[in-house]
Amino acid sequence: MQGWYGKSYTCRVNRTVVCIVLLLFLTAAAVPAQEDDGDEKIEDTIRRIQEEEQEREDPEAADDDEDSSESGCGLFGEIFWEIFTELFWQYLAAIRFAPYPYAEYSPYRFSSLIPPPTEDRKIVNLQAAGDLSLHFDGTCGNINRLSAQLSALHLNLFNQTIFSAHSSLSSISLNGGLSLLIGGFDLSAFVGAYKVTTTDTVMFSMGLASRLFFPGKLYLDVYNLNAILVDRIRFIHVAATLNYALWRFSIGVGYNYNRIVDNVFAGPCLKAGFWL
């Protein structure tokens, strides 16, 4: 009995050993194949990275990308410019002005985009105005301004003198730009040149001007002019007046603010204007 049991136990041990040996052999045979697959994948990844890097550094490839991008942007820009130019020229052609604001028998107070009767087909509008301000610091100021509208094209000439009992400071500026005109409202943006004639200093200038026409022959006039000196805005002029129209003339009251190289000259003003 013991002999049979011992023989059976020995057979089981032998079979176990044989299975372990076979498993180790199969595992050893499979490892080289897996190592080959892993190496190939890593090498492929490295190759792809190198290819992407080479394409990024290749000037011809970059030029191709830039050319395609520029061609797309250029086409869009051309289409946009054509549309803008067409609309802008239509806008210029449609603008008409009243003979003067609040003119009798005029269908609008200042401007219109609807073609008016033949006698009101005016495409140019001119205004000359001057004001005198009191600054309460021993100085006074005088501003003279000529504004011209050729349809939506805007031009203005600005001249200012700040004076005291024995001294004066004067400047002049010429600016041009474009206007948005909607019935009784206009807004102009402009750039130009600014010169302090007292010192012969010439600078770049920019600003905004707006007029808003109310019922009762009243209109608000706001003018802003800025000049840049040494990469900073060192000259700021702001004038706001409420005006009353009498035929082609107007009279108004308002406030002038001037900041000139950190010195402020500001105070109330009286204004007179004439529409040409």
Image (cartoon, rainbow, N blue to C red):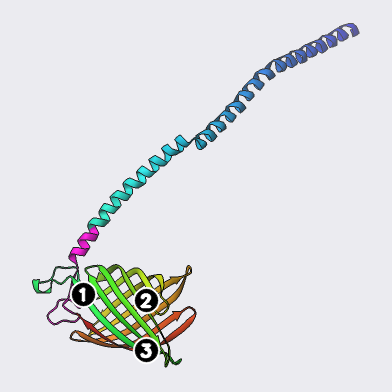
**Residue beneath the point at 34% across and 83% down:** 143
Secondary structure at numbered mark 1: strand
Q: Which residue is mark 2?
A: 224
Question: Magenta span covers which residues?
Answer: 87-110
Q: Which comes sooner in the sequence, label 3 or label 2?
A: 3
The span from disc 2 to disc 1 (Cα, nearest Å) is 20 Å
Q: Which residue is mark 1?
A: 125
Residue in front for this viewpoint, 271 or 234: 234
The span from disc 3 to disc 2 (Cα, nearest Å) is 16 Å
Secondary structure at numbered mark 2: strand
Q: Residues within 10 Å of mark 3 (few under 14, many from 20)?
A: many
Q: Which comes sooner in the sequence, label 2 or label 1?
A: 1
Side of 194 where 50 appears, left or right = right
- Amino acid type of disc 1? Asn
Q: Quadrant of the N terminus?
A: top right
Q: Which residue is mark 3?
A: 133
